[in-house]
Amino acid sequence: MVNRPGEAGLAAARALAAARPDGRLIGAVAVPRLLSRAIEAHAGPLLARLDFLAVVAEEPLVLVGQTGTLDDLDAFRALGRQAVLGTPPHGSAAHLAALALGGSLSFDMLAFASAPAARQAVLAGNIACALLALPEAIAALRDGRLSGLALAQPRRSELLPEVPTFAEQGIPLQLAAHRGLAVPAGIDGAVLSPLVAALKAVVVDPDFAAQAQAEGFVPRFIGQAAWEPMLRRMLAELGERWTQDPWTARHD
């Protein structure tokens, strides 16, 4: 295994796209962050040189506040414009969701360099709340240091059944981060079939389910036939949004 950090996944994507299409190199990808970063860097054509095999995990997004200070969405509403909502970096799933949330709630938004930094700012009482991927908040939610105000899901999560959805509270916000695998484009289907079968088996494996329960993600298999059209739609939507209302400062 090789860790290729940098540019929110673009460095690894470039290495993957440049590899021989023989099935020997497989990359882990995070969406929508990879897509938003590709748009920011004018690297959209790079994504066409990859085949996105399958999603294996979904990360719900949760709005959290410091326990005892901000325990529900009504309390957040009552703060009005004095509320500051923290997020992970620009273009992350949580940041994009927070931008959409701005049409329904009043707050000032602050994007942090990382999700742990945004979480710590809430725990320290420096900001009112943060919108985070659930794995970044699950430990503090379970030990009572953070309160779950709302989930950006169509229904409540078995991981935190007591946390209501935004939809239950009159806000139609639904967005999640996905983790999956990609390969260089052009690999023979016969080479990929055993890998796809293995991914399907992993998602229903009891050990993987136990890991998901502990870490706050949802095992979910979405195959290439469904995932790639989803990615194309998301890339087009983000591209249009970048032109009309960019989520971070443009340098072009």
Image (cartoon, rainbow, N blue to C red):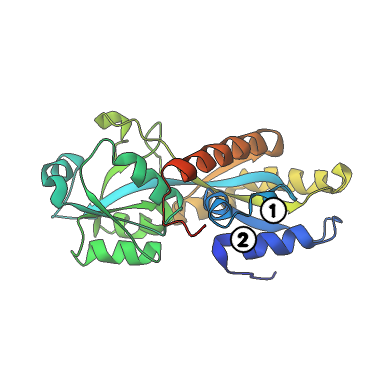
Q: Which image quadrant for residue 245?
A: top left
Q: What is the CA distance from the residue labelled 2 to the residue labelled 1? A: 9 Å
- Percent of width and height locating residue 15: 72, 64
Q: Which mark is residue 10?
A: 2
Q: Which mark is residue 132?
A: none
Count of numbered labels shown in the rendering? 2
Q: In the shown orientation, is residue 25 left or right of residue 227?
A: right
Q: Residue furthest left?
A: 78
What residue type is disc 2 on? Leu
Q: Residue furthest front?
A: 252
Q: Are marks 2 and 1 in contact (CB under 8 Å)?
A: yes
Residue carrying label 1: 46
Give the residue at x 81% y 47%.
192
The answer to which of 46 and 219 lies nearer the viewer is: 46
- Percent of width and height locating residue 128: 19, 55
Badge 1, how many Cα within 10 Å: few under 14, some, many 20+? some
Badge 2, how many Cα within 10 Å: few under 14, some, many 20+? many
- Percent of width and height locating residue 217: 48, 49
What residue type is disc 1 on? Leu
The quadrant of the picture occupied by the N terminus is bottom right
- Percent of width and height locating residue 48: 72, 47
Give the residue at x 30% y 47%.
63
Give the residue at x 78% y 61%.
18
Instruction: Tell me the element at label 2.
Output: helix
Give the residue at x 75% y 43%.
197
Say which label, 2 or 1, has the lower sequence index: 2
Q: Which image quadrant for residue 229?
A: top right
Instruction: Tell me the element at label 1.
Output: helix
Q: Relative to residue 203, is residue 139 depicted above or below?
A: below
Q: In the shown orientation, is residue 189 left or right of residue 52?
A: right
